[in-house]
Image (cartoon, helix red, strand yellow):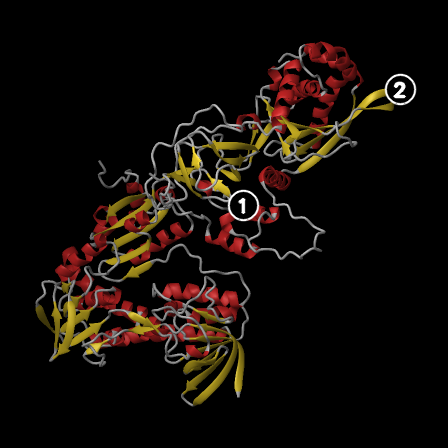
Amino acid sequence: MTRKTEVVVLGSGPGGYVAAIRLGQLSKETILIEKDTLGGVCLNVGCIPSKALIRVARLKKQIDAGKQIGVEVSDVKVDFAKAQVWKKSVVDRHTSGVEFLCKENHVTIIKGEGRFTGPHELEVRTGSGTESIEAKNVIIATGSRPVEIPGFRFDGTHVITSTEALDLKEIPKNFVVIGGGVTGLEMATMYAQLGSKVAVIEMLDQLLPGLDIELVRIIERAFRRLGVDYHVKSKAKEHRDGKVYAVLEDGKESSFPCDKVLVTVGRRPNSDTIGLDKTGVKTDSHAFILTDKKMQTNVPGIYAIGDVVGPPMLAHKASKEGIVAAEVIAGMSSEADFRAIPSAIFTDPEIATVGLTEAQAKEKGYDPIVGKFPFTALGRATIAGETEGFVKIIGDKSSDLVLGVHIVGAEASDLISEAALAIEMGATLEDVAFTIHPHPTFPEGVMEAAEAAKRKAIHILQK
Amino acid sequence: MVFEFRLPDIGEGVAEGEVVKWLVKEGVEVKENEPLVEIMTDKVNVEIPSPKKGTVLKLMAKEGEVVKVGQVLLVIGEKGEQATTTTSTAPTAKTPVTTTPAKSESLVPTPSTPAAVPKKPQEILATPATRKLARDLGVDLSLIQGTGPGGRIIDEDVQQFKRSGARPAVVAVTMPGKAGSEERIPLRGIRRKIAEHMIKSKHTAAHVTHVDEVDMTEIVQLREKTKESAEKRGVKLTYLPFIIKALIPALKKYPYLNSTLDDQKEEIVLKKYYNIGIATNTDQGLVVPVLKDADHKSITQLAEEIARLSEKARAGQLTLDEIQGSTFTITNVGGIGGVFATPIINYPEVAILGVHKITKRPVVRENQISIRDMTYLSVSFDHRVLDGAMAAEFMNVIKQYLEDPKLLLLETD
């Protein structure tokens, strides 16, 4: 028997579950299909568990740092198995929270693998059989998965993805990361802080490719202090006999001993496993689903959101797109017309950025002015023992508009929201500089950077 | 050398103009100072002369298109050169522009050929909440000129645009009329400006019209007596200069009628100068040339200037300077007919005086019916700025001077 509904949301990650809840709020009859656990990669094997384990690593670092300020704890050791239990409890708490919210909003959850059999027909393979669903509207929110590279076939034990890297039973002695992107560097930092000997191998000419190199320099310095052995312009060749073989920048082959090798070289959209050919939905050359600003695909009634529609692959982008798709289905005028999408990287120190870099601003025809303010000049940073890093703000000279903010330093992930709001509201440097920021706090750095762009920052010399 | 000629800064805060007519074609040779294009700004047409000699390689705007100051109008170069267009807007130096017809004035060419600067992104500044409002109302933000700080589009702008129904974001479906029974005339040039201006005034000012009847007998007699001597001086004397003379003391006594409302600062700006706009009918549509410092001019001077300006208006030769800066406007439909009208305020002014036909009518004077030269005067005012009582008192002053013109002798300017 075919079940009929107004909306099917395919995939329950931060895009899908948010869309489903919003649809429920808007009184749309909604079925949410999830093949695994509610919450998708983000909640189960991504953002949330990684930040949980990163907290463990940071806490250890802070306890170690306590000695300098008179707090001595002897014999600090990490019980990683216990940390994993705690991490799982964090994940479970949030996945059950999502389930609760879905149910309370009258969203029907079906556990199973869904695929299209027609533009408005889906088939779900559940544990107990197959179910057919007919839906007026479908939101594709199937996310992405890690890509493999030659010589490194994922085996789940030695050559692993981020999923396994977050679920290790013990801290690896030797940990090799292939791919110096966001996930790779977060894991590299975390395991290095927990005591692993870490190496990072990146193919392109810088770590965190695409990011303002000035920010990356701070991370490189942090890596040198942590003893992370990083290599750019280097190509990992193969994994053999507990070693990763790679050709380094100098053209010579080198080997890195490892008990775990994490491959994080990118993710591909899950658009190929859902019977998309039955719908006529168009994708681009990278298999990302094409949508308009209302998240509509070329097929009426089919929407797509999140990683499956293309980069940046960020949970918060997916969530916002999910809300847009849900509201459009409910007949509202919503559009994904945001001016900027912030991103946060939980290295140590953290990096967070929103908007244009100086180079991008120039490319777009602005006349950028740049203000930079170092964490060393922030009282709060000194107290926290976190004086690495800076806030860099990019404004347009003639209009004074804030175009971008780039932060490397403690709490960067929390600092960036103010900048995102500024850009979304069309604020000027003057607006940010004038707004009173409480003292002593990290956000003062954002204010002072805006002042520095006009060469009037108080707490640094600008001659 | 390829030269991109951009719409120069014409002055007086003009930010854009409409291409009314191209006077050259692609491929033709132009001389320096040869008129290239007719541009409609605000309410006058200006002819833009070529800054240099060369061949017109490419026209970058269509007739009817609105171009912004700094936007590339056309590309001039050597014959056979490629018009590689780089940009469409960029700041330019102030370039003088001659008004129609351009003959003798010389033109300073824009200082240098702009290099291939990337186009400055067209920012549509609006907060997320305002963007949502615009979507809900079906308003295309790119069509709106924001009035918020730094050109930000604020909620009020979106609502205003929606109310004015200007250019809808969604193309309206028009029902085809019977073949041949309808004619479609594009809204262009002065007509479009008038449409925009009127709708802005109607939707902004709180219009009220106050009407009074005025005994013009004394003025009619005064004009009869002075007409001839004026004619000898080559001046055709109409009633309008007399009415202006009666208007000035009324404006001085009630300065709120000679003001503008600064919506943004929420301040009323009282003008201490008296530039009287004279609504003038032309073949193209209504234009409003301005009598500057009318309070310092004699009746004959006013008459002369009105004649000169209305002639220029009809010939489409008014300069920008001659149509800007009015503080109060008079519209005179007396020559055409009607009893009285309720004119639309020449926004951002706050009041307009409607002058109508003078006819002989029986009226009661000292309990006798007598035949007098009567007219109606109407004043439309912005009720946001002043109230009906003030408008009535203002009208009483005008009426007093017109009914007893001797009093004008007591006025100093």
Q: Read off the residue under disc 1.
A: B157
Q: Is residue A260 left or right of residue B320?
A: left
Q: Kindly identify the amino acid type of the residue bearing the numbered disc 2.
A: Ser
Q: Nearer the viewer, mark 2 or mark 1?
A: 2
Classify mark 2: helix, strand or loop.
strand
- Judging depth in this view, the residue of B244 and A106 nearest the camera is B244
Q: Kindly identify the amino acid type of the residue bearing the numbered disc 1.
A: Asp
Counting residues from the start of the chain, the first of labels 2 and 1 encountered is 1
Is A171 situated above or below B122?
below
Classify mark 1: helix, strand or loop.
helix
Label 2 crowd (10 A; few <14 / some 14-19 / many >=20):
few
Image spot of residue A419 (x, y percent): 35, 51
> Where, quadrant-wise, is the C terminus of chain A in this rendering?
top left
What residue sits 64% from the left and 40% below the top? B202
One can see residue B341 in this view: yes
Image spot of residue A155 (x, y percent): 22, 81
- Judging depth in this view, the residue of B219 and A284 nearest the camera is A284
